[in-house]
Image (tube, grey):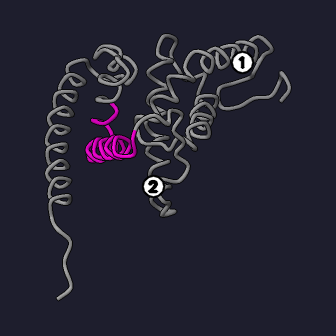
Amino acid sequence: MDATTSNDDGPLGPASVGEWRARLTGMVGNYRPLVCRNLKRLGVDDARVDDAAQEVFLIVARKVRDIRPGCERSYVLGVSVGVAANCRRARVRRDLDPDEGLHFADPAPSADALLDRKRERELLGRALNSLAPKLQRVLVSHELEGLSVVQIAKHGGTPVGTVASQLRRARDCFRRALRRELCRSTRARSTPPDRPT
């Protein structure tokens, strides 16, 4: 692309291309570890985290001009929530083995401990996925990534009171969903298999 090429945002001058690249490079450098942690928390397989992080930053690169200064972190985290949801849906569509691609760096935990952790992650993931996307985004941004209600509101262009209300509702819905999932999980493990007669 040369310096005189235009797109929807207007002509790209040499200074704006340099600023665009510098801003994007800074965002990748500052937020890549955060994005990877967030993607893992949201259920993306370890083997696919790097690809998903790249997809996040490709989306950010296309929208870098639209991101308000000071809102980069919350924007990147919001994109990572959407990419994680797409990865989970793709995994279900392809009907992959849930253990495929998992690599554990620490071989010390026992098989039972690993299985318990996996069940807990799956349980939390199902509870989180049961929330509406808007509530899921607010809950993850606040509880997992530590953004304040004001920061979430500023990024989304939503009134602070609305975000606070969404956060309360998201917490309530998440607690109820978690209780439901715990009951299902307990029943599934306590029900003996059918015996042939």
The kind of residue tagged 2 is: Pro
The kind of residue tagged 1 is: Arg
Judge by depth and name the residue closer to the eye, 123 or 19: 123
Instruction: Kindly state the secondary structure of the residue where label 1 is placed.
Output: helix
Horizontally, residue 79 falls left or right of residue 165, namely right
**Residue indicated by mark 2:** 98
Q: Quadrant of the N terminus?
A: top right
Label 1, label 2: how far apart the Cα atoms are: 38 Å
Within the magenta stretch, is there residue 112? yes
Using the image, tell me which numbered label, if any, was put on residue 21: 1
Within the magenta stretch, is there residue 123? yes
**In the image, what residue occupies the spot 50% across and 44% down?**
45
Instruction: Kindly state the secondary structure of the residue where label 2 is placed.
Output: loop
Q: Quadrant of the C terminus?
A: bottom left
Dot 1 or dot 2: first in sequence order is 1
Judge by depth and name the residue closer to the eye, 183 or 154: 183
Q: Quadrant of residue 18?
A: top right
Q: Position of residue 102 (x, y in %)?
A: 52, 46
Please rate how many residues cluster around mark 1, counting C-alpha atoms within 10 Å: few if below 14, some from 14 to 19, many from 20. some
The answer to whether mark 1 and mark 2 are in CB contact below 8 A is no
**Circle nearer the viewer, 1 or 2:** 2
**In the image, what residue occupies the spot 25% across and 24% down?**
163
Q: Position of residue 76 (x, y in %)?
A: 50, 26
Using the image, tell me which numbered label, if any, was put on residue 197: none
Q: Position of residue 51 (x, y in %)?
A: 62, 40
Q: Position of residue 4 (x, y in %)?
A: 83, 23
What's the magenta bit mostly, secondary-structure-wise? helix
Q: Please give the range of residues in magenta.
A: 110-137
**In the image, what residue occupies the spot 56% across and 49% down?**
101
